[in-house]
Image (cartoon, rainbow, N blue to C red):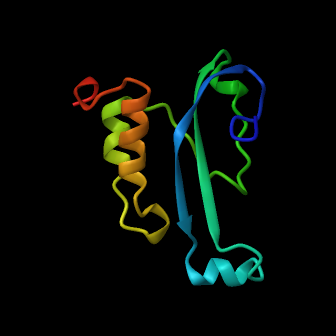
């Protein structure tokens, strides 16, 4: 609900995989050293709404877009410290949800 800004979805399953990372030092300092990083939890959901129903919190999410699996794979290549191991985690999740590389290559 936090990510979509509404309740027009059904959680199909929760991934067994998580992505844990540390934030850059300047972010850790900005939050007064209360947190060092984040554990991301991933869900497969069915969305029943329309684009107009999605209201993202601009403090949390810069933007969103619908993407094919091919576009997703291209967009997860990041060299930023925050995204360390992100691609590997996403590949594991796609495999877990039976979305093999051949589905989007």
- Residue at 51% x, 36% y is 65
Q: Position of residue 70 (x, y in %)?
A: 30, 34
Q: How many marks?
A: 0
- Of the 4 image quadrants, the one containing the N terminus is top right
Task: Give the answer, above or below, for where 61 lies relative to 5.
Answer: below
Q: Quadrant of residue 12?
A: top right
Q: Position of residue 26 (x, y in %)?
A: 61, 83
Task: Give the answer, above or below, for where 10 lies relative to 86.
Answer: above
Task: Give the answer, above or below, for where 64 lies relative to 98.
Answer: below
Q: Is residue 68 left or right of residue 50?
A: left
- Residue at 42% x, 30% y is 96
Q: Position of residue 52 (x, y in %)?
A: 69, 26
Q: Is residue 12 left or right of residue 72?
A: right
Q: Furthest residue to the front? A: 16
Q: Quadrant of residue 35?
A: bottom right
- Residue at 27% x, 28% y is 104
Q: Position of residue 33 (x, y in %)?
A: 74, 82
Q: Furthest residue to the top? A: 48
């Amino acid at each position: 609900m936090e990510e979509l800004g509404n309740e027009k979805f059904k959680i199909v399953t929760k991934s067994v995989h998580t992505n844990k990372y540390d934030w850059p030092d300047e972010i850790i300092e900005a939050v007064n050293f209360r947190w060092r990083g984040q554990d991301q939890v991933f869900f497969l959901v069915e969305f029943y709404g329309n684009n107009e129903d999605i209201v993202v919190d601009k403090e949390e999410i810069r933007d969103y877009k619908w993407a094919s699996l091919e576009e997703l794979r291209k967009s997860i290549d990041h060299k930023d410290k925050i995204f360390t191991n992100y691609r590997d985690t996403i590949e594991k999740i796609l495999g877990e949800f039976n979305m093999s590389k051949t589905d989007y290559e």
